[in-house]
Image: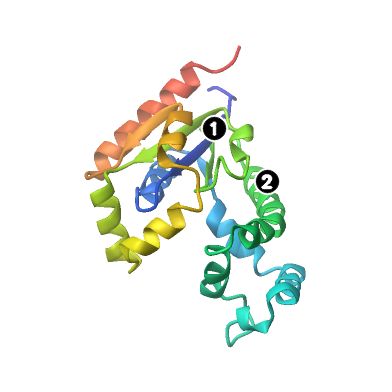
Amino acid sequence: MSNYIPTIGLMGGIGSGKSAVAEAFRSLGCIVANADENAKKALLDEDIREQLVSWWGKDILDDDGSVSHEALATIVFKDTSQRLRLESILHPRAKQIQEEQFRLACHGTKALIIDAPLLLEAGLDEQCDAIVYVDASLEIRQNRVKKYRGWSIDEINRREAAQLPLDTKRNKADYVVINEGELDEVHNQVKQILEDIHNRRPV
């Protein structure tokens, strides 16, 4: 069995179904580090919480004293400078958490997956041997987000405006997974991508 464990970046538009693709990678023997989840874990760090309160006041805290994700979103999605400020403190800690997760990789692990909406923006693509873009039509993405997150189309557009254009992300990718329906089809696409990456491994 090959000891080669590639690092694969996973990105896509809001509502593209990255989580389903990430789960397909996991089911095939990969370790998945979810950047959003790791950022939420970073917000539990007491030093980070205190720094954020010093910047924006105690109104960013929920009743239980934890950082409110909604309050942060309100601040950073309408002010790019504040978003960059937040990322400057969250990204390093989230990266540490990711490294801890990847250190658990054992012999036989197929790949290390960085599941990150801001893969390119955060420079995480530099760690990757390959990049996978998850694609779905605008209509399907909007319907998913309205159904599962309750966001309006304006909210989707506002959040995507804070990211690189989707065409730019798609063009940067080595592989594209179409996720518009059957999970079995998604699984098959992911399996083929993994096989291709291993077949193309550096000598």
| CA gap, disc 1 and disc 2 | 18 Å
Find numbered disc 1 in the image and state the secondary structure of the residue it sits on. loop
Instruction: Give above or below for 40 relative to 201.
Output: below
- First of labels 1, 2 by sequence position: 2
Q: Residue at x 77, y 69 (%)?
A: 47
Q: Residues within 10 Å of mark 2 (few under 14, many from 20)?
A: few
Three-letter amino acid code of the residue under disc 2: Glu
Please name the residue that numbered disc 2 is placed on: 99
Residue 62 locus on image (x, y percent): 58, 83
Three-letter amino acid code of the residue under disc 1: Gly
Marks 1 and 2 close (CB-CB < 8 Å):
no
- Front position in the image: 70 or 177: 70
Residue 155 visible in the snapshot = yes
Left of 72 or right of it: where is 173? left
- Front position in the image: 26 or 79: 79
Left of 67 or right of it: where is 48? right
Please name the residue that numbered disc 1 is placed on: 108
Instruction: Give above or below for 81 relative to 203.
Output: below
Where on the picture, by quarter, is residue 151?
bottom left
Q: Quadrant of the C terminus?
A: top right
Closer to viewer: mark 1 or mark 2: 2
